[in-house]
Structures are given as C-alpha cells and as structure tokens.
Image: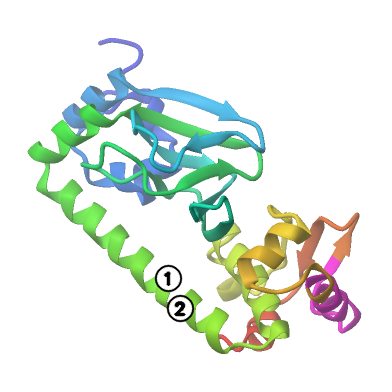
Amino acid sequence: MRKDIHSDGTPVLCLACEARHKGICGVLEPHQLVELAKATTRRQVEAGTELLSEAGPVDYHANILSGVVKLTKSLPDGRQQIVGLQFAPDFLGRPFEANSNLTAEATTSVRLCAFPRNTLERIMGQAPELERRMLVQALKQLDDARDWMLTLGRKTAAEKVASLLLLICRNIDPCAQAKSIPVAFDLPLTRSDIADFLGLTIETVSRQITRLRTDGVIQIENNRSVTVERIDRLAARAGAN
C-alpha cells in the first residue's frame, strides 16, 4: 500500500482536513479524493495576496483551510465595495465559470487546498452528490447575502458593527455560543475596510467598537485583538437570534 493512501483508500492528506468533513470534499468517494489529491497543492499566502481577479481567468478553485478572504466588486471608475467574507472551510471560486465575477483577497494569512478548475469540474460530472453540495453552498451564500442586505438596509450603526463581529465569531468558532465559551480573534479587516463593508465612516466604526468595549461586550487590545466573553450578549447588540 502506498504510504500516502490510508487503508480505506482515502489520501492521507485528506484525513485530518477540515474541508474533508465539512466542506465540498465530504461527499467524495475515496477514489474521487485520490483523483483530486493528485492535482492538489497546499498553499500558504500572506495578507494582501490577490487570489482571484475580477474579470480575470479562473485556473483553479480552492478550499479555505484557515484564515479569512474578502470578496470585492468594482465599478468602471475604480470604486470598490466589499461584498462578502469567506472563512474555513468555504469553497473559493465558482465552477463552470472561465472568468471570475469578483476579486478575492486574503485579509489574513490564509491556507488553501487548491486544485485545477478542469479537474474539479470533471469530478463533478461523475459525482451528483458533489453537485448537490455545491448547490447547497450556493443557496447558503444567497441566504447570507439576503441577511446582510437586511443588516445594511435596516440596522443602526451600533447593530451593524455588532453584526460584523458576530459574523466573525460564528465562523471562527461555530459552537462557541452553544457552549457559552469566549471567542478570541484578530480583526481580519482594517477600520477602513469595516467602514466600507458596513457603509459607515471610519469614525463611526471606531466609536461603536469603543462603546462595545466600554459596555463590556468585547475586550480589545492593540486595536486588533478581540475577545468576546459571551456571544449571546453580542448577538443581542446585533439584533440577531
């Protein structure tokens, strides 16, 4: 038996992978994982690295293994808008599209499991469950976008800032609220990016973060390191369930 293949036929590389169990690869059979793994490369990129370029060719797709990626769209005059964030184990890219319709940029150090677009699309043709998983993910992204439209269109500045922090918390540790445990993270966005994402001024963002800290909802050090002791209190400030 080859040392890079487990006894059940699964590539060793995939056994402890977060995306293997929670991402798109979770529905693949061992022989399909082997085919994908043969073309897979692990990449570590630093903050600020462009992963996809709007209107640029898409040569590969990837599972995000760790870190945060921001998605932006541009107007013809160069103005940009952040339209979303992606976390592990999200899937980066859109199958069957030769060109990207947005720009994806690492906002933190990011680890990726990348594979050629053609390889994934070929396997999708052989695995209906993979197509279904991709559809479920696309529908979830649509639901998330609608929720964020509500946040941007109807929530107050205080609720918007709390909503963003809550979004990060729930993706950094999805089980933290149920377990009532603290969540600590470094803000993956600058104050300027947060203002852009929320449609607020930088001054308003800073004021609302200070208010959350003063009220004991969050702790923050060095302007980046955030600790949320109780997510339910943050959720209440965000006007969320």
Q: Which residues are magenta?
A: 205-219
Q: Which residue is mark 2?
A: 147
Q: Is residue 154 magenta?
A: no
Element at label 1 = helix
Residue 240 sits in quarter? bottom right
How far from the left and from the top, in percent, is residue 177? Answer: 60, 74
Kind of residue sitting beneath label 2? Asp
Residue 155 picture quarter: bottom right
Q: Which residue is mark 1?
A: 144
Who is closer to the viewer here, 156 or 130?
156
Q: Residues within 10 Å of mark 2 (few under 14, many from 20)?
A: few
Task: Identify which residue is drawn at 70% across, 55% down.
Answer: 189
Numbered circle sitting on residue 195: none
Position of residue 3 measured from the top left corner of the image (x, y, whole percent): 35, 12
Q: Nearer the viewer, residue 57 or 75?
A: 75
Q: Secondary structure at mark 2?
A: helix
In the picture, measured across the screen, residue 223 lies left or right of residue 116, that is: right
Q: How is the image coloured?
A: rainbow
Pointer 1 with pointer 2, Cβ within 8 A: yes
